[in-house]
């Protein structure tokens, strides 16, 4: 198991996997937001995967977001009301931000803790934007 590293993310917070891995994973870690605090997560040149581990909060819906239950489509009568409230974040919720999207996370009254992975996006063959 030469080169294997075990890191306690609860103590360390975040690590740079690029020192050991050749794949697209550029950063992993546990992030914490105190009650009522906000943070913007923008997928500019990278993509993000978030997984709520404890606490609760809200995520501003990225433009064009689709809920797993199929709501928030153009024919959803409650779309604007839900968009104003944000998407609920609770333990076990996953949020994926593809290239070019963004969201604002707001921690609830007990705060919010989430696992955050940052992934590099390969350039297209012409060297431009992969979209």
Image: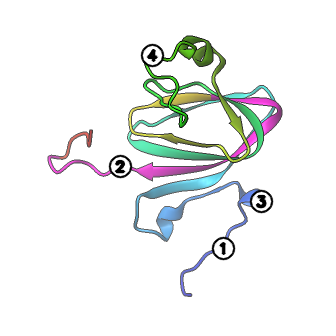
Residue 95 x %, y %: 56, 41
Q: Could you tell me how far apart the alpha carbons at marks 1 and 2 are, in whole angstroms?
A: 26 Å
| Magenta stretch encompasses residue 123 | yes
Q: CA distance from mark 3 to mark 2?
A: 29 Å
Residue named by callout 1: 6
User: Where residue 75 is drawn, which disc sits there?
Assistant: 4
Q: Secondary structure at mark 2?
A: loop
Does the residue at mark 4 contact the one at mark 2 (Cβ under 8 Å)? no
In this view, the mark in front (4 or 2): 4
Tell me the quarter of the image containing the N terminus. Answer: bottom right
| Mark 1 vs mark 4, CA separation in Å | 48 Å
The residue range painted magenta reads 105-126
Identify the residue at horizontal 39%, vertical 38% (top origin): 99
**Residue carrying label 3:** 11
Q: Nearer the viewer, mark 3 or mark 2?
A: 2
Q: Earlier in the sequence, mark 1 or mark 2?
A: 1
Query: Mark 1 and 2 residues: CB-CB less than 8 Å, in contact?
Result: no
Question: How busy is the neighbourhood of tag 3: few (under 14 within 10 Å), some, or many (20 plus)?
Answer: few
Outermost residue on the left side: it is: 126
Q: CA distance from mark 1 to mark 3?
A: 12 Å
Judged from the image, the secondary structure of the residue bearing numbered disc 1 is: loop
Count of labels shown?
4
Is 19 or 98 nearer to us in this picture?
98
Residue at 52% across, 26% down: 71
Label 2 sits on residue:
121
> Mark 4 or mark 3: which comes first in sequence?
3
Q: Earlier in the sequence, mark 4 or mark 2?
A: 4
Residue drawn 38% across and 41% down? 45
Between 58 and 73, the residue placed more toward the observer is 73
């Amino acid at each position: 198991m030469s080169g294997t590293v075990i890191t306690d993310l609860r103590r360390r917070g975040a690590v740079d996997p690029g020192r050991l891995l050749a794949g697209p994973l550029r950063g992993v870690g546990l992030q914490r937001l105190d009650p009522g605090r906000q943070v913007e997560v923008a997928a500019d040149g990278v993509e993000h995967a978030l997984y709520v581990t404890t606490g609760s909060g809200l995520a501003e819906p990225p433009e064009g977001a689709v809920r797993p239950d199929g709501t928030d489509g153009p024919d959803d009568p409650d779309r604007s009301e839900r968009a104003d409230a944000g998407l609920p974040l609770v333990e076990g919720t996953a949020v994926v931000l593809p290239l070019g999207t963004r969201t604002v996370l707001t921690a609830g009254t007990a705060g919010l803790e989430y696992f955050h992975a940052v992934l590099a996006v390969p350039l297209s063959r012409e060297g431009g934007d992969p979209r």
